[in-house]
Image (cartoon, grey):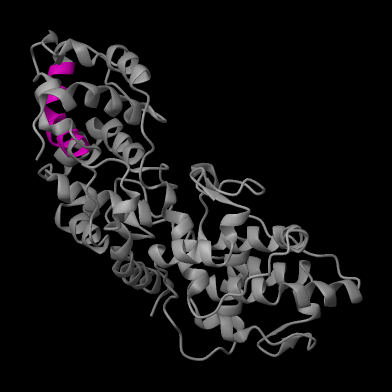
């Protein structure tokens, strides 16, 4: 079975366990933000709605659009929704050229599709075996460990890790045995290596190709809800916060700019381990050990902390509503344009998911109006969409009945 097929199977299996996370109510930033029960359904929609006729995912799919498995997604649901809106005219044109009917999405379908797109970067890009072989020597791993019978004998052979498509198992072992490895490297006067970017993935790719690990294990998935519990039980929360809740000694791991793939997290944990061990000793915190799929659960939790948007700034949203030309067609509270509906009375803006669905479904009609009026297509970057939602909801909360 090819690596691409293994990756696809892993993503499907991973999605099944994510269902626990996506129905976990404590994460809902807004009451109306309905999360999908299973991101795997997003994959089905990706195919059935025709997205796969233009886009590939890790090299499998159609032609004309970018490979979505190789593009780092935006940091939240609304940022991804903004990207769909920004590229809507180009996608409409391309679908017309290919004779593809532009699909529509219910709010539930839009939630599932975006969740699927968000999950694509969890595993990151596949590693390069040739680069991994070079790193195995450059980082001095070969002085203590062997792969395929070649290398040192101080530490155990690494062949067994080649069974895993994901580097989580290796990351867990590197953390658990880190103190002993640090002592051995110091005794042998081996400089402690650092791993950047996808270097851990490259190493694993080399081990997978050259090692004698036996029958493959497609993946070691994780449950974000279990990871949330472990984050507290393992005392991570004493030094680190997630979205402002927790310790302040280390960085807030809920910050979207810290979102990383599994390989990158493994490298970061290794690089910073000595500092964390020293701080834990000072604070008299026992060094946590991970067993089974605990590391997978923890990383899955950290990966998905940024999916839901923080509350937006309605004052910034008011400026965006004006600057982007929304008032040329839409009104709020009876003030503004008359081409489109009064958004203060629209149920489409009662939640981010409803808004994303409405924007996509009505984009073709809006494209025609904007073109007729010779206006530029408005683009939403960064937190624009989040702030716009906050502004619109400041009106709708008083005028739209609850569902």
- In which quadrant is the N terminus drawn? bottom left
Q: Is residue 96 left or right of residue 227?
A: left
Up the image or down, 50 lies above or below 229; here it is above
Give the quadrant of residue 175. bottom right
Residue at image point 31% right, 34% down: 82
Residue 360 colored in magenta in the image: yes
Give the quadrant of residue 121. bottom left
Name the residue nearer the viewer: 138 or 273.
273
At which x and y percent is residue 29? Answer: 32, 42
From which residue to which does the magenta span run?
Answer: 355-370
- In which quadrant is the C terminus drawn? top left
Name the residue nearer the viewer: 398 or 388.
398
Q: Is residue 54 visible?
A: no
At which x and y percent is residue 279? Answer: 75, 57
Give the quadrant of residue 287. bottom right
Residue at image point 42% right, 30% down: 382
Q: Is residue 111 left or right of residue 262?
A: left
């Amino acid at each position: 079975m090819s690596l691409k097929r293994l990756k696809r199977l892993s993503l499907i299996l991973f999605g099944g366990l994510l269902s626990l996370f996506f129905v976990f109510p404590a994460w809902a930033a807004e009451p109306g933000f309905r999360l999908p029960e299973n991101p795997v359904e997003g994959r089905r929609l990706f195919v059935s709605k025709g997205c796969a006729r233009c886009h590939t995912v890790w090299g499998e799919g159609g032609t004309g659009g970018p490979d979505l498995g190789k593009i780092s997604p935006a940091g939240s649901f609304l940022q991804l929704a903004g990207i769909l809106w920004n590229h809507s005219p180009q996608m409409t044109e391309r679908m017309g050229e290919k004779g593809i009917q532009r699909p529509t999405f219910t709010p539930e379908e839009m939630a599932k599709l975006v969740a699927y797109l968000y999950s694509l970067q969890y595993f990151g890009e596949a590693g390069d075996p040739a680069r991994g072989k070079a790193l195995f020597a450059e980082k001095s791993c070969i002085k203590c460990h062997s792969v395929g019978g070649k290398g040192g004998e101080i530490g155990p052979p690494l062949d067994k890790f080649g069974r895993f498509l994901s580097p989580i198992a290796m990351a867990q072992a590197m953390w658990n045995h880190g103190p002993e490895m640090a002592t051995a490297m110091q005794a042998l006067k081996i400089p402690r290596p650092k791993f950047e970017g996808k270097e851990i993935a490259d190493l694993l790719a080399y081990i997978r190709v050259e090692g004698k690990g036996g029958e493959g294990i497609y993946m070691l998935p994780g449950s974000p809800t279990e990871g949330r519990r472990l984050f507290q039980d393992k005392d991570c929360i004493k030094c680190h916060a997630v979205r402002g809740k927790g310790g302040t000694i280390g960085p807030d791991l809920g910050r979207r700019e810290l979102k990383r793939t599994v390989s990158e997290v493994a490298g970061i944990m290794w690089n910073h381990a000595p500092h964390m061990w020293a701080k834990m000793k000072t604070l008299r915190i026992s060094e946590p050990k991970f067993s089974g799929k605990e590391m997978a659960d923890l990383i899955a939790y950290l990966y998905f902390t940024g999916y839901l948007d923080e509350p937006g700034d309605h004052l910034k949203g008011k400026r965006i509503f004006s600057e982007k030309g929304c008032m040329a067609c839409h009104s709020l509270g009876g003030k503004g344009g008359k081409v489109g509906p009064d958004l203060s009375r629209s149920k489409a803006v009662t939640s981010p998911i409803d808004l994303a669905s409405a924007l996509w479904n009505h984009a073709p009609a809006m494209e025609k109006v904007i073109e007729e009026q010779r206006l530029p297509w408005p683009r939403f970057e960064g937190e624009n969409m989040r702030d716009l939602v906050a502004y619109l909801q400041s009106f709708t909360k008083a005028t739209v009945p609850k569902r």
